[in-house]
């Protein structure tokens, strides 16, 4: 796993050298119209504590159950030169409550999109 260090503009590795249980795994699979997986993961440790971050690499034993869904609302991520990050593009931000050029957190935009699907 890794954590994004904004000051260093790089990922800080968080090794977890033990078997864990996947509690949550969510992500996106498109960047600028091309396939690219970006996944966040929360794992449970033997002592029932949890760790989370960006999934960089994992080895599965014995199994990992994954369900992939296609959302009816397309949200594309595009590189933002101001922050150096891939963010949900402006049209999607505007559709779900953000304003062009703002820095509304992607999670808020995604939650707004999901609530409108209900």
Image (spheres, rainbow, N blue to C red):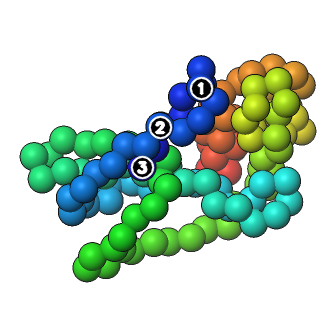
- Residue behind mark 3: 1
Expressed as whole percent of the image width and height from the top left, the position of residue 66 reads 45, 72
Please, what secondary structure does the residue beneath circle 2 have? Answer: strand
Structural distance between the alpha carbons of marks 2 and 3: 9 Å
Of the numbered discs 2 and 3, the one sitting upstream in the chain is 3
For label 1, count other residues whose C-alpha is less than 10 Å away and answer few (under 14), some (14-19) or many (20+): few
Q: Nearer the viewer, mark 1 or mark 3?
A: 1
Expressed as whole percent of the image width and height from the top left, the position of residue 2 reads 46, 44
Question: On the picture, is 70 further left or further right than 22?
Answer: right
Question: On the picture, is 89 further left or further right than 38?
Answer: right
Q: Are marks 1 and 2 in contact (CB under 8 Å)?
A: yes
Is residue 19 at all visible to an observer of this figure?
Answer: yes
Which residue is at 18% across, 41% downward? 49
For label 3, count other residues whose C-alpha is less than 10 Å away and answer few (under 14), some (14-19) or many (20+): many
Please, what secondary structure does the residue beneath circle 1 have? Answer: loop
- Residue behind mark 1: 8
- Residue behind mark 2: 12
Expressed as whole percent of the image width and height from the top left, the position of residue 11 reads 54, 39
For label 2, count other residues whose C-alpha is less than 10 Å away and answer few (under 14), some (14-19) or many (20+): some
Structural distance between the alpha carbons of marks 1 and 3: 17 Å
Above or below residue 115? Residue 103 is above
Q: Nearer the viewer, mark 2 or mark 3?
A: 2
Is residue 96 at all visible to an observer of this figure?
Answer: no
Above or below residue 99? Residue 26 is below
Structural distance between the alpha carbons of marks 1 and 2: 9 Å
């Amino acid at each position: 796993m890794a954590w994004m260090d904004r000051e260093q503009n790089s990922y800080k590795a968080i090794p977890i050298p033990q078997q864990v249980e996947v509690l949550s795994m969510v992500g996106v699979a498109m960047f600028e119209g091309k396939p690219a997986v970006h996944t966040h993961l929360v794992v449970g440790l033997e002592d029932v504590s949890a760790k989370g971050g960006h999934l960089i690499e994992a080895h599965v034993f014995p199994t990992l159950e994954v369900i992939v869904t296609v959302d009816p609302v397309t949200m594309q991520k595009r590189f933002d030169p101001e922050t150096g990050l891939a963010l949900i593009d402006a049209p999607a931000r505007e559709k779900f409550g953000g304003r062009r050029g703002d820095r509304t957190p992607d999670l808020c935009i995604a939650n707004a999109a999901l609530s409108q699907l209900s």
